Image (cartoon, rainbow, N blue to C red):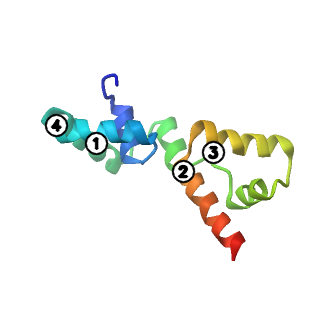
Amino acid sequence: MSAITRQMLLDYMNDALPDTELASVEKALRESADLRALYREVVEQQDRGEHTVGAIWRRERVSCPSRDQLGGFLLGAGDPELLEYVEFHLKTIGCAYCQANLDDLRKAKKR
């Protein structure tokens, strides 16, 4: 694995890394005091509320589909372009928030 960046630590904090990278970052954090110090900086910066466009976009989940749109995706109903975007968002971007939301909808559908 390459050097761990601030962005990787932010993604780690937000549980937005693939499992293999998540485990690697966690292992590196246990082994490196310098990396733990950098991680604390990242957490503090996040807690203060970074005000860049990208940070606000991620924090407010601007690109995340709504729960109704996720439900439509689950049923295969709706605008084909929107369904394609939702699939991209879930599978390529790997948004953990939306994946959890979709899992919840799947469980509700089974009831």
In front: label 2 or label 4: 4
Instruction: Decide which of 86, 44 is in the foreground and name it.
Output: 86
Q: Position of residue 31 (x, y in %)?
A: 16, 37
Label 3 – label 1 distance at C-alpha: 24 Å
User: In the rendered image, which residue does mark 4 sit on?
Assistant: 31
Classify 109 as above or below 4.
below
Classify 87 as above or below 109.
above
User: In the rendered image, which residue does mark 3 sit on?
Assistant: 90
Q: Residue at x 39, y 33 (%)?
A: 7
Q: Quadrant of residue 67?
A: bottom right
Secondary structure beneath dot 1 equals helix
Q: Amino acid at mark 3?
A: Leu
Q: Is residue 29 left or right of residue 69?
A: left
Q: Amino acid at mark 1?
A: Glu
Secondary structure beneath dot 2 equals loop
User: In the rendered image, which residue does mark 2 sit on?
Assistant: 60
- The mark that comes first in sequence, 3 or 1, is 1
Q: Position of residue 111 (x, y in %)?
A: 69, 77
Label 1 – label 4 distance at C-alpha: 9 Å
Label 2 – label 4 distance at C-alpha: 33 Å
- The mark that comes first in sequence, 2 or 4, is 4
User: In the rendered image, which residue does mark 1 sit on?
Assistant: 26
- The mark that comes first in sequence, 3 or 2, is 2
Q: Is residue 9 left or right of residue 57?
A: left
Q: Position of residue 12 (x, y in %)?
A: 37, 43
Q: Residue furthest top?
A: 2
Q: Residue at x 71, y 70 (%)?
A: 109
Q: Position of residue 87 (x, y in %)?
A: 70, 43
Label 4 – label 3 distance at C-alpha: 32 Å
